[in-house]
């Protein structure tokens, strides 16, 4: 019995994710590779769930058609003061896009797929590395915290903040 597993690891880099999507597309469509374990950081954390589910066309669409206005909203300094905003940028468009794709149905399918997904985040306040996973029995580590990833709300929260611990995280 062959117990070897194949892993796909995708790093961050924002728009560099488009290159990763192209590589994944070739792995799947040309080389017919199937991955058992998928690990993602930053934009890789947004790519790996879709790759795990074989949604290569959706990945290609997202990374070739979405523009900056669909990811970030920019305000001028005056508008920031009027609205009482802390920043001249808002990632609300990206948040909405993520919530449309990574819904509860998607996560139910992902968690029953047999694929192991690992999403890495860093708490900006404590600098603690936190790994979220769909693995059934994730190994503990003394170097980072491991938490089970169980639903879409939890995944979406990693893109913005972790309210339970009041820790702002960076994918």
Image (cartoon, rainbow, N blue to C red):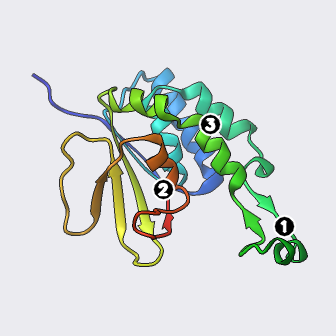
Name which of mark 1 and mark 3 comes first in the sequence: 1
Q: With 5 as the anchor, is 162 left or right in this view?
A: right
Please give the residue where the numbered disc 1 appears in the rendered image. Answer: 75
Badge 2 local density, few (<14 within 10 Å), some, or many (20+)?
Answer: many
Q: Which residue is at a point 66% across and 37% down the rendered structure image?
A: 62
Badge 1 local density, few (<14 within 10 Å), some, or many (20+)?
Answer: some
Residue 36: image location, x then y, percent: 31, 33
Badge 3 local density, few (<14 within 10 Å), some, or many (20+)?
Answer: few
Q: Which residue is at a point 71% across and 75% down the rendered structure image?
A: 86
Residue 145: image location, x then y, percent: 28, 63
Q: Which residue is at a point 88% across and 71% down the rendered structure image?
A: 79
Residue 40: image location, x then y, percent: 44, 49
Q: With 13 as the anchor, is 35 left or right in this view?
A: left
Residue 141: image location, x then y, percent: 20, 62
The numbered mark at residue 127 is none
* The N terminus, quarter of image: top left
Q: Please tell me which residue lies in front, 139 or 157.
A: 157
Please give the residue where the numbered disc 3 appears in the rendered image. Answer: 100
Q: Secondary structure at mark 3?
A: helix
Q: Secondary structure at mark 1?
A: loop
Q: Are marks 1 and 2 in contact (CB under 8 Å)?
A: no
Q: Please tell me which residue lies in front, 7 or 122.
A: 122
Q: Please tell me which residue lies in front, 11 or 86.
A: 86
Q: CA distance from mark 1 to mark 2?
A: 24 Å
Furthest toward the left, the residue is 1
Name which of mark 2 and mark 3 comes first in the sequence: 3
Asked if 106 appears above or below 118 in the picture, the reply is: above
Please give the residue where the numbered disc 2 appears in the rendered image. Answer: 158
Quarter of the image for residue 100 reads top right
């Amino acid at each position: 019995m062959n117990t070897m597993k194949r892993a796909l690891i995708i790093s961050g880099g924002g728009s560099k994710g488009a290159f990763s999507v192209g590589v994944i597309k070739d792995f799947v469509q040309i080389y017919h590779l199937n991955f058992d374990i998928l690990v993602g950081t930053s934009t890789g954390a947004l790519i790996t769930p879709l790759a795990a589910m074989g949604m290569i066309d959706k990945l290609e669409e997202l990374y070739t058609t979405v523009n900056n206005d669909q990811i970030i909203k920019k305000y001028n300094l005056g508008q920031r003061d009027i609205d009482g905003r802390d920043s001249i940028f808002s990632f609300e468009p990206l948040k909405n896009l993520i919530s449309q794709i990574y819904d509860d149905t998607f996560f139910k399918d992902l968690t029953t797929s047999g694929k192991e997904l690992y999403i890495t985040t860093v708490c900006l306040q404590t600098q603690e590395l936190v790994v979220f996973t769909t693995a059934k029995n994730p190994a503990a580590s003394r170097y980072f915290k491991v938490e089970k990833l169980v639903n879409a709300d939890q995944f979406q929260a990693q893109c913005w903040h972790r309210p339970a611990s009041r820790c702002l995280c960076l994918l």
